[in-house]
DNA sequence: ATGCCACACCTTGTGTGA
């Protein structure tokens, strides 16, 4: 089973890239973030023609998440239960015996800002909800754009901002792994300076000035079947790329 | 200190992203 996450930064703009990439990589399950369009504007027919079912939780201009799957998608949940959120950031579903949670975590803008407080509240709500989800679904994946670089090695040494690397954010990430979730990427030896996002500005991709903020966290029964996990930088060199690269994990039976 | 880029919007600048 091959599962991927990709912040496409506008589904409409990135659709040609997405269709090419689906045909090439043939993932079984894909979580997308930053659709930046409402459900009614999602190019469903193109994605279905590529062989995928899809469930979306869209929003105009900002946010928006989706789950694509070659197998049937059941028990869809939009947003975090009990957390009133005007922003479309979470979609969860059951595919086979795997519970998949796809999320676009808040950016937080700046440590100490109102948006940062929202980020931490959102993280707390997510963590409390997932505690029960993991108990109910032994095979669970939490994936998406976390907007957190969990360790120093996940940020370029020249990253000077606090946001994405601050102690409160990293503690929130640790609370998620504390639920029994494993960072699939770190389950394997990886090249130094492996990142999944590079600023569009300042030739950041060419200089590899990036952050590893897109993650695939898996529960123990799934971690036991992990075969590989990597960042797919091939999409970042195309014309009009997303600023994020997909992260792909492969599981055995 | 800002813009550097990209995207969306009842666009012609502004908000947001990370």
Image: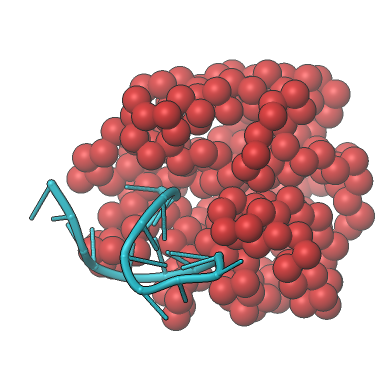
Chain colours: A red, B cyan
Residue A110 location (% of width, % of height)? 34, 35
Q: Is residue A126 visible?
A: yes
Tell how many labels: 0
Residue B15 location (% of width, % of height)? 41, 50
Q: Is residue A24 visible?
A: no
**On screen, residue A226 above or below A42:** above
Residue A248 location (% of width, % of height)? 61, 55
Q: Quadrant of residue A26?
A: bottom right
- Seen from the viewer's position, the closer of residues A217 and A41 is A41
- Seen from the viewer's position, the closer of residues A14 and B8 is B8
Q: Quadrant of residue A219?
A: top right
Q: Quadrant of residue A13?
A: bottom right
- Which residue shows up at 34% across the image and 52% down it? A210
In the displayed structure image, the side of residue A91 where residue A181 appears, left or right: left
- Which residue shows up at 59% across the image and 21% down it? A124
Residue A106 location (% of width, % of height)? 51, 39
- Which residue shows up at 22% across the image and 40% down it? A160
**On screen, residue A210 above or below B5:** above
- Which residue shows up at 75% across the image and 34% down it? A140
């Amino acid at each position: 089973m091959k599962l991927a996450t990709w912040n496409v930064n506008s589904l409409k703009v990135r659709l040609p890239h997405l269709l090419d990439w689906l045909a090439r990589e043939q993932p079984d399950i894909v979580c997308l973030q930053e659709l930046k369009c409402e459900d009614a504007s999602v190019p469903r027919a193109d994605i279905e023609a590529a062989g995928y079912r899809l469930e979306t939780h869209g929003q105009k201009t900002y946010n928006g998440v989706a789950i694509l799957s070659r197998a049937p998608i059941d028990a869809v949940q939009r947003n975090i239960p009990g957390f009133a959120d005007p922003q479309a950031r979470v979609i969860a579903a059951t595919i086979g015996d795997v519970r998949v949670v796809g999320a676009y975590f808040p950016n937080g803008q700046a440590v100490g800002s109102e948006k940062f407080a929202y980020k931490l509240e959102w993280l707390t709500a997510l963590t409390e909800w997932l505690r029960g989800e993991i108990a109910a679904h032994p095979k669970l994946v939490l994936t998406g754009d976390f907007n957190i670089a969990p360790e120093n090695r996940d940020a370029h040494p020249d990253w000077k901002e606090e946001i994405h690397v601050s102690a409160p954010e990293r503690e929130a990430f640790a609370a998620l792994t504390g639920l029994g979730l494993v960072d699939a990427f770190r389950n394997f030896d990886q090249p130094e300076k492996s990142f999944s996002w590079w600023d569009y500005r300042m030739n950041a991709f060419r200089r590899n000035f990036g952050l590893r903020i897109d993650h695939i966290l898996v529960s123990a029964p799934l971690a036991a079947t992990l075969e590989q996990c990597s960042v797919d930088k091939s999409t970042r060199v195309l014309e009009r790329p997303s600023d994020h690269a997909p992260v792909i994990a492969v599981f055995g039976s």
